[in-house]
Image (cartoon, helix red, strand yellow):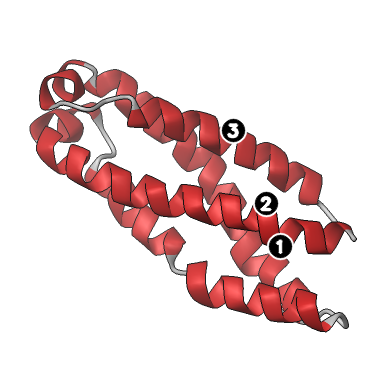
Amino acid sequence: MYIDQLKKQHTEIARLTKELQQYTDAAAVTSKAAAIASTLSKLSGVLSVHLAAEDKYLYPQLSKSEHPEVSRTAQAFFTDMGTLAPVYQDYKQRFLTASRIAAAPDAFLKDTPAVLGALSARLQKEDRELYPLVAE
């Protein structure tokens, strides 16, 4: 299985997420809108591949596992977290460019912690609960 690749993607996603979370006031968001858009673009690239791999392949494959704990866990994860991709897509579309970010710094500051927090929670939960089951 390709869990090692997914773990590497988790590391990169966490790094990019941390970069986006460093902006905490509207003035910084406005002045650094181009850098934010660049980081968001990089995150979106890694994340689109990562979420597609997990949501379309990994979770369905693990849901069919002969090991009940693996199957149950994969099904629960997909049910709980399978909706993250469309939520992230909406977020990305709203803040796709530097001009959109600069035009709505308060919205960026409000929405970023919720979306990136949900993403971080998913990654941590997978690292702690799902991936170790697969490695066994």
For the C terminus, which image quadrant?
A: bottom right
Task: Name which of mark 3 and mark 1 comes first in the sequence.
Answer: 3
For the N terminus, which image quadrant?
A: bottom right
Residue for badge 1: 130
Disc sitting over residue 12 in the figure: 3
Q: Is residue 53 visible?
A: no
Specify the quadrant of the image occupied by residue 89.
bottom left
User: Disc 3 and disc 1: Cα gap in Å?
Assistant: 19 Å
Q: Amino acid at mark 1?
A: Leu
Q: Amino acid at mark 3?
A: Glu
Task: Name which of mark 2 and mark 3 comes first in the sequence.
Answer: 3
Find out whether the residues at labels 3 and 1 contact each other: C-beta distance under 8 Å. Answer: no
Callout 2: helix, strand or loop? helix
Find out whether the residues at labels 1 and 2 contact each other: C-beta distance under 8 Å. Answer: yes
Q: Foreground residue, 102 or 8?
A: 8
Q: Amino acid at mark 2?
A: Asp
Q: Residue at x 71, y 65 (%)?
A: 58
Q: Residue at x 32, y 19 (%)?
A: 35
**Residues packed near mark 1 inside 10 Å, few (<14), some (14 to 19) or many (20 plus):** some
Disc sitting over residue 127 in the figure: 2
Q: Residue at x 14, y 43 (%)?
A: 107
Callout 3: helix, strand or loop? helix
Taking the image as shown, residue 82 lies to the left or right of residue 40, namely: right
Q: Foreground residue, 17 or 89?
A: 17
